[in-house]
Amino acid sequence: MRTRLRSRRTSAIVSALLAASAVAVSGCGGNDSASPNIAVVTPAAKCSALAGITVPAGSIGLPTKGATVVSATLVAATDSGNNNGEYCKVLGSIHPVDFNAPDIRAEVDLPTNFNGKVVHFGGGGFDGTIANTEGSPADGFLSGVEPAGVSTPLRRGYVTVGSDSGHEGNVLDGSFATNDEALANYAGDHIKMTHDFAAYIAKARYGSDFVHSYFIGGSSGGRQGLIAAQRFPHDYDGIISTYPASGITGLWLQMGRISRSLLAPGGYVTPAKGKALLAAVIKQCDALDGVADGIISNPAACVFDPTAIRCSGGGDTGDSCLSDVQLNTMTTAGTPLNFSFNLANGVQTFPAYNAFTGADFWSVGLAWGASADDALIEPGVIGKSAFYYTFSNDMLRFAVARDPALSILNFNSANPGSLTSRVQVVSALMDSTSTDLTQFQGRGGKIILQHGQSDQFIPAQLSIDYYDRLASRFGQGPLSLFLKFYLVPGAAHGVGGQFNGSYDGLTVLDNWVTKGIEPKNLTITDLAPPTAGRTRPMCEYPQWPKYVGGDPNLAASFVCSN
């Protein structure tokens, strides 16, 4: 009886909202101005009417027990700290089938000046918190920052959407993965559920469906973007996948392998030693692209001999050199991991990092930890613990073995033994390495895939390998009609590297989808001091920016070369 009453209440509220939307004059989908002779329902009333409504399970395309709007709050354009104009902030919970699994917590921001489109924000790491849907998505290489004059999607009139992927925690906490439904939600199911929840709420607010739907994410969010194209191709018209963890299973296995070298006695490479290594690499390879500008634009041409920075006698004699044990750590990071079994989609290897061609593992403590002692902190402490160790350790203990007593430091990444089949199950669940984009291609979907050559968390070669497999399937010409792949020299993973590049990727994607304007002659801007403001061309793979003369701080002084 209670369920019946709740359903009637929900239907009545939704009907009222739809009716309100019908009588309001809408110039651009969300304009709430009206002539003096027509009854007006204010944005505040439309927003508050959303609070407490339920979304039926049948309106969500994967199994749930429905969803609930926890709160709906109108944020005024004049509110302190709000630069997004007026919008309705909706917080909701999507309820799992398994009573023991956590809810998916989601946010849907509904602008009063709705432009008919939505941007779904991806997460990162283990997620655990809702993405900052009031800010900028990962359409560039410096987290949360856009070039001057580029507004947030919300301010531009896009509905913005994000979730915690189905558990509360932080990017270093994988303990949720002992529950099958929570793991499946994190792996990708939350994408569909969050999308459908947002679509229901937006239709209740505006009275119409989304005209266009985009997904933008970096790292695990980039992986989520590829999953959106592979598994839910009818939900999205355009995707930006930035430094994606597409082969996330191989990634944590490789991170575990590197951690065993990094955390072995004497193997830790300190930030000071990393700075010395990077300086030596830059000195040797910087000018190979035609100009000494602090960026290695063509890493394939850089052949650095690690013995050039070896400490005399092979022992640790100071910050200006690496011992033999530390060189082993770097060599481990700079070589691929070959598996004795197949991961999802026939993947048998995980690529090397650009360890001797500019990858910056030390600019922040998150990658390899703030120090050897801090690296092993459990549970992970952001800025101190090593992400490599914590992420791989939690994937092993919670997602694969379901045994918190295990340690990645005693695990054979190349040959997991009795856990091999379970690793393969998790790989099939989580990896976004499928090349089957035919449905997404067929409906006219567009993808921008991009990766930085100095990425310290996910090697650029992972995206190169995925692109090459796509090109083998579709042919490079047909593939380029719906997917563009860019490698950005010097760019790292949200922070660090030698070039913190950013550009208005959302506008580029939207123009491609809505106007058929194919991305060409794109320019990316460095936003990190002291080199902020310098520009480079974004070269479609396999091209790279070659200096041809002029001001080395201007993109016009470079051409995209093979």
Image: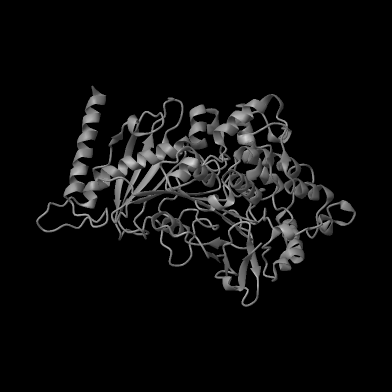
For the view shown, which residue lies furthest in the top direction?
1
Pinpoint residue 350: horizontal percent, then vertical percent: 68, 42
Which corner quadrant of the image does residue 531 belong to? bottom right
Q: Report the residue at 41% width, 36% height from top.
A: 193
What is the x, y in percent for residue 301?
A: 74, 60
Which residue shows up at 48% across the image and 43% down it?
229
540 left or right, relative to 406: left
**Up-down relation of residue 56 to residue 206 (above or below):** above
Residue 100 in view: yes
Viewer-proximal residue among 101 and 192: 192
Residue positioned most to the bottom: 550
**Residue 552 falls left or right of residue 504:** right
Residue occupying the point 69% across, 24% down = 418
Coloring applied to the structure: one colour
Of 94 and 173, the residue lying toward us: 94
Q: Is residue 143 above or below residue 551?
A: above
What is the residue that sits farthest to the right in this orientation? Answer: 313
Residue 2 horizontal/vertical position (percent)? 24, 24
Q: Where on the picture, by quarter, is residue 387?
A: top right
Q: Is residue 129 visible?
A: no
x and y percent of residue 264 in the render?
Answer: 77, 42
How many marks do you count on the picture?
0
Quarter of the rendering occupied by the C terminus: bottom right
Q: Quadrant of the N terminus?
A: top left
